[in-house]
Every structure is written in C-alpha cells, then in structure tokens.
Image: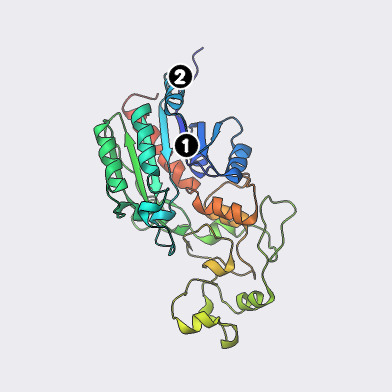
Amino acid sequence: MDQPVAVRVYDFFVGCGGASCGFQASGMDIAFALDRDADAKKTFTANFPHAHFEFTDIYKVNRDAVRLRVEREQANPVLFSGCAPCQPFSRQVTRRPKPEQDERVPLLTRFADLVECCRPDLVFVENVPGLQTLNVGSQPFCGFLDRLKKAGYEMDYGPVKLMKYGIPQSRRRLVLVASRHGKISLPDETHGPGTPHEQYSTVRDWIADLPPIRAGEEHKEIPNHKAANLSARNLERIAATREGRSNRDWPQHLILECHKRFSGYSDVYGRMSWDAPASGLTTKCTSYSNGRFGHPEQNRAISIREAACLQTFPMDFVFEGSMASMARQIGNAVPVHFAELIGQQFIRHLKEVGKLH
C-alpha cells in the first residue's frame, strides 16, 4: 500500500522548534532541522525524536547532501523554513556590531543558496520587520526576494501583527510565504474587529490556569513552571506595581537612579495585564527587570512555562538548558499557533494546485 503523501518540513535555524511544532500541528512531518545551539538541540530532539538534526552552522552544511535528501522525498512536497536570528535587524537591540561586521546578516543569503540548490515546493521566512529596511550593500531581504522570483517562486509577504492571528502578544513580525506551484497568500487574520473572533487573545486566556508559585520556585508537577529569583528590593518593587502598570507606580525610594534621570524605561519592571495581550516576548522574557514581564498578580516574573504558553507552545512541550537559555529559546521562537495557521495555508494551497489530496 502506498504511503500517504505529507508535506516534509526542513527547518533551518530551528532553535527549540516553535515553527516545527506549529507545522506538525497542521499535519506536516518534521524531517530535518539545523541549528548550532547546543541547548536548542537538546530541546528540539526531546520534542521531535524522529527528525534528523544537523548540529552545525548553515555556512557549513553540505548543500548537495541536503539536495539529495530532498530528492529522496519523491512524492512528498517539501517546505523550507528559514527563520534566521533576528537580533541584527531588531529595534530592541541597542548595541550590535555594524551590519557589515555581523556574521548573522548574510544568513538569509545562505538560506537562499539552499533554496536555489534544492528547489523545495514551499518557503517560509519569519523575522522582525526591520529586516526589510536594513541597507547593507545588497539589501538582504530585497536580494532574497529577487532570487526567489528568478527561481520561479510566487510569494506574498509583509509585516503582520501576531495578535490578529490569536497570539496573545503585541508583537509584529515580517512574514513571507512562497510557492513553486502558483500564486499563494498569507492567511487571513483570525482575531480582532471584522474577523471570526472579535476579541484578541489575552494573557488570562493562556496562563490563568497555571498554579501559583513564588519567585525562585519551581512547580513539582508542571514541567518548566519555574520563576526566576528576585532580590528583596525587587520583591518590594513588584509588590508596589499594580496589574498592567510599571515602575511609575513606585515610591521614590524604590526608583533606580538611572530612571530618575531619564523618563523612558516605561516598560521595564512592569506587570502584564490579565485582559490584554502581553507585550512582545524577548530573549529575556522571564526577567522582571528587562521588560513588562511581571506576572499580572503574583510577585514574580512570568515562569518559563508561562512564557512558553504566551508563545502558544503546548503544555507537553519541554525545554532544556538553564533559565537564561530556555528564555532565549522561547523568545526567539516562532509562535506555535501562528506557524500552525501558516501550515494550514500551505496545505490548502497544495490541495488547490493538485499537489496534495
């Protein structure tokens, strides 16, 4: 009996596997992953034990070996996912190497080399909107679009607000979908006025059911439900902060000297609101002092598990590494539910063009 045809995902810069998790939930098979982060590898392989993992840099991977893998897929359509590290293009980063000195800037160019060599059926890219504006010689995103077009791909791309797709964060991303089999478009928005779900998804929707823990405590039964420790002064600060508010609530003796001299920093040391989306999660999303990452009512920062929930990871997805490493993996991840919607859109497209039944 013939094996059923399924989309096979090759996930480059896979990290912990947020995009892979969403694509798998949409009905795809995870065939191949690549990353050079040791903790991300541990997390990914714990959750996708049957996928082939290349623990290497994308500059070092053998393109012909990848091409041969793709060719062996036979009737299975192949999706290449390339969500490169976003720090070179992010407004959140104030100290970074000059673009021409940052080795991460050409990652999209190397990904384009693999697409041209292997000719997958589908391509997905997700990054910060700043990727569109970086100007380094041959602007990387424009160059990538040009190469896709010349290779015969049709595409749709643009900045999206993830809360309009059911993600409980006010996070904007640049998203591209491309196909070698005809016209394709980004999925329709699902949340907000004029959509099937008028209300945006909120912090309460995703973390309210988790049991309370204290700062520095780890729940004995729920994996990764662990919160960072806080100093006595920071415990006093968060106790003085109301839900949805920030350091501007504090009495004078709690305010940091640098905050007294500068009126910014309005989001640091803040609490989330229960009934609104969270601010965009970063690689320091479990650190109380690095953003509006305080729990809405408990006197602590959100836990690793709560951060994962706000990135829409399922509860049985486990993370490996130190607290800082797990937070970095989660902050860098593609939100799972968004990747699932993208996967569903790809599958609809392939059925429309006769590549899936």
Q: Where is residue 323 in the image (x, y as percent from the top left)?
A: 64, 56
Instruction: Name which residue type carries label 2.
Output: Arg
Residue positioned most to the top: 1
Q: Name the image quarter holding residue 50.
A: top right
Residue nearer the viewer, 252 or 351: 252
Quote the CA–CA distance across marks 1 and 2.
17 Å
User: For mark 1, what is the residue?
Assistant: 11
**How many numbered dots are placed on residues in this image?**
2
Secondary structure type for disc 1: strand
Residues tagged 1 and 2 counted as in contact (Cβ below 8 A): no
Secondary structure type for disc 2: loop
Q: Where is residue 113 in the image (x, y as percent from the top left)?
A: 36, 34
The disc at residue 72 is: 2
Which corner quadrant holds the C terminus? Answer: top left
Q: Does residue 14 appear anywhere in the picture?
A: yes
Instruction: Name which residue type carries label 1.
Output: Asp
Residue nearer the viewer, 294 or 229: 229
User: Residue, x 59% and y 58% (percent of image)?
Assistant: 207
Mark 1 is surrounded, within 10 Å at the Cα level, by few (under 14), some (14 to 19) or many (20 or more) other residues, namely many
The disc at residue 131 is: none
Left or right: 183, with 53 as reference point: left
Q: Which of marks 1 and 2 is nearer the N terminus?
A: 1
Residue positioned most to the right: 220
Left or right: 54, with 141 as reference point: right
- 222 shown above or below 285: above
Q: Where is residue 244 in the image (x, y as percent from the top left)?
A: 52, 72
Q: Where is residue 149 in the image (x, y as percent from the top left)?
A: 25, 36
User: Residue, x 50% and y 51% (percent of image)?
Assistant: 332
Q: Name the image quarter holding residue 40.
A: top right
